Amino acid sequence: MQLDEADPKGLVRESYAIEGISAGECRSIFVDWALSLPSDRVAEALRTLLEAYAAGRPDHPMSEVLAGGLAAAPSPRRRGGRAARVTEA
């Protein structure tokens, strides 16, 4: 995938140019970026962006956000419900 296809609005490129940007601001930009692409192309675009931008700036907050986007989502676990509240006697 070409860089202009991976970042059509230049959002990620601009995030690397902002001095003092926070991780929270990078996550917000990431969401806007991800919503601008077809969902089946996001992983490929992330790899392209990591190669183009994150390789040269590994300690930038956006590099961490992009790498996190490729990580597998944690599997859901049960969080309560009746069985968790009631103990059998």
Image (tube, rainbow, N blue to C red):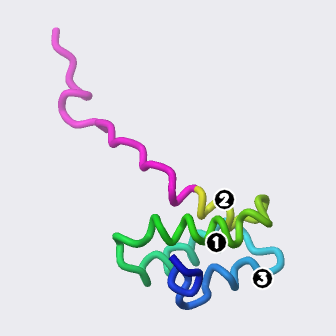
Q: What type of secondary structure mainly makes up the magenta span?
A: loop
Residue at screen point 76% across, 59% down: 58
| Residue sitting at the far front | 1
Give the mark nearer the N terminus: 1 vs 2: 1
* Labelled pair 1, 2 in contact (Cβ < 8 Å): yes
Amino acid at circle 3: Ala
Residue of label 1: 26
Of badges 1 and 3, the one in the foreground is 3
Residue of label 3: 17
Marks 2/3: CA distance?
15 Å
Occupied quadrant, residue 26: bottom right
Amino acid at circle 1: Cys
Q: Secondary structure at mark 2?
A: helix
Residue of label 2: 64
Q: Secondary structure at mark 1?
A: helix
Residue at screen point 25% across, 28% down: 85
Whole-percent x and y of residue 21? 75, 74
Whole-percent x and y of residue 75? 36, 41
Marks 1/2: CA distance?
9 Å
**Is the residue marked by circle 2 packed among few (<14), some (14-19), or many (20+) residues within 10 Å?**
some
Give the mark nearer the N terminus: 1 vs 3: 3
Magenta residues, as a range? 68-89
Amino acid at circle 2: Glu
